[in-house]
Image (cartoon, helix red, strand yellow):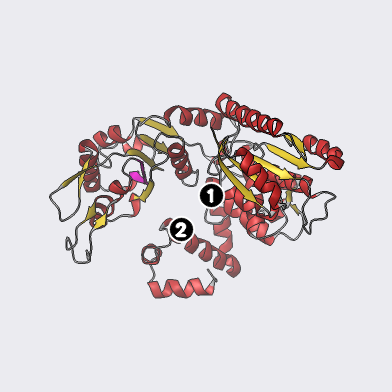
Amino acid sequence: MIQARILIIDDDPDVLTAVRLLLKKTVSEILIEKNPEKLPSILHDQQIDLIMLDMNFKSAIHSGNEGLYWLSRIKEIKRDIPVIMITAYGAIDLAVQSLKQGASDFVVKPWHNDHLLEVVKDLISNKNKSNKKTNNQLVLNDIIGESDIMKSLFHKLTKIAPTDANILILGENGTGKDLIASAIHKQSNRSKHPFVKVDVGALTDSLFESELFGHKKGAFTDAREDRVGRFEMADKGTLFLDEIGNISLLQQSKLLTALQNRQISRLGSNQSVDVNIRLVCATNVPLRDLADENRFRKDLIYRINTVELQVPPLRERGNDILLLAKHFIQRYADKYNKPAPELDSSAERKLLSYHYPGNVRELQYSIERAVIMAESELLTNEDLIFSPLENPQTQASSKTDEHNLLELEKITILKVIEKHSGNISKAAKELGITRTALYRRLSKYNI
């Protein structure tokens, strides 16, 4: 049986049933859908290996042919997915046109079962071979890139992911270190087991042990019941410790002991529990700074850093910037039910010339804003506004502009809340205001 997920889209339930019955002994997973308008959300939420798409639907789309329209949408979102067009005999000319627009093959109703099975097997086989031969552009968990520096990163990732080596991911804020960690897990031998993420940089000393190792009821004042820690949650899977460079020396000592012994003890218990985890860590602190013994224990560095991956800043990735921008345009056009605008030459020049201190995250937020505010089918350089938080000159000049100050405050609040994963108490503490004051501002900015 072929390990693949096939999506069949046709508004005829008889066709869906026939194809599903034909393929169920050959392909491991088959998804069926009558409504093509659900395509964008399916492609964003799931990994699809092949699509079978009808040429005609009873829909409100007037593009000459619905199949060609939805084929173009598929190629905008995930251009590497093979697509087989399902057509009636009278529409073969349109099916041929679909091949010119990116379809991989077409079948004519009523089809010969052996022929259809052969087409499906060949396309999935070719896709798998292509994935093994090259990583010119990897699209996995929104990791997109075809620059030389990203090819090198993808090559290392595919080499180390199947191993159990501990990995340290280095890179500036906003470069996508968490996405790299998730991709490592999904390509590892532990992919069927949990992927557990902890932002250890946000944990106080008092919460660190409870969060990672768990606790017994009554271990401290608020311990009203037994709780499993993140180490146990990640057993047989991957434990991802984000912002590892920001933990205290006391926390480092406790973490090192757990990693050396491969055992943890819940707070309030003397019983040791064996844990089987693959450790992935990430930090925006340069390795040379971590090597300072006054800041970080060298023996812990060696323990977490069997292999290191350096994620490049966006400013070093060349035309990947445009690939990412177009990806985010499509994502937010789908999210806000708007047509996806194009980038004109002035917008492309601005995107390529900007220095991106906030990296991919800054680009993402700028594109989201541009899509929301877009009033035409074309984005110009004036539609692209980068965050004043990341641009000191913009921040300084905005002090005389009340509107910009309000926008700056709103952006700051959003970033701090995101940093603390929606924890209002932690966000208010970092902002230096009370929870009540923060709630007032959330209401003020309709957040």
Relative height, residue 164 to residue 390 (above, below): above
Residue 211 colored magenta?
A: no
Crowding near the residue tagged with mark 2, few <14, some 14–19, many ≥20 C-alpha atoms within 10 Å: few
- Say whether residue 233 is visible: yes
Crowding near the residue tagged with mark 1, few <14, some 14–19, many ≥20 C-alpha atoms within 10 Å: some
Relative depth, front residue between 299 and 183: 183
Q: Quick one: label 2 or label 1, which is nearer the N terminus?
A: 1
Residue furthest to the top in view is 133
Measured from the top left, where is residue 91 in percent x and y? 85, 42
Residue 238 colored magenta?
A: yes
Residue occupying the point 42% across, 30% down: 162
Which residue was labeled with disc 1? Answer: 361
Q: Which residues are magenta?
A: 237-245
Q: Which mark is residue 418?
A: 2
Relative height, residue 281 to residue 10 (above, below): above
- Say whether residue 386 is visible: no
Measured from the top left, where is residue 164 in percent x and y? 35, 31
Q: Amino acid at mark 2?
A: Glu
Relative height, residue 191 to residue 127 (above, below): below
Residue occupying the point 55% across, 58% down: 395
Q: Determine whether, in the image, residue 249 is placed left or right of residue 414.
A: left
Residue occupying the point 81% across, 38% down: 95
Mark-to-mark CA distance, 2 and 1: 12 Å
The quadrant in which residue 249 appears is top left
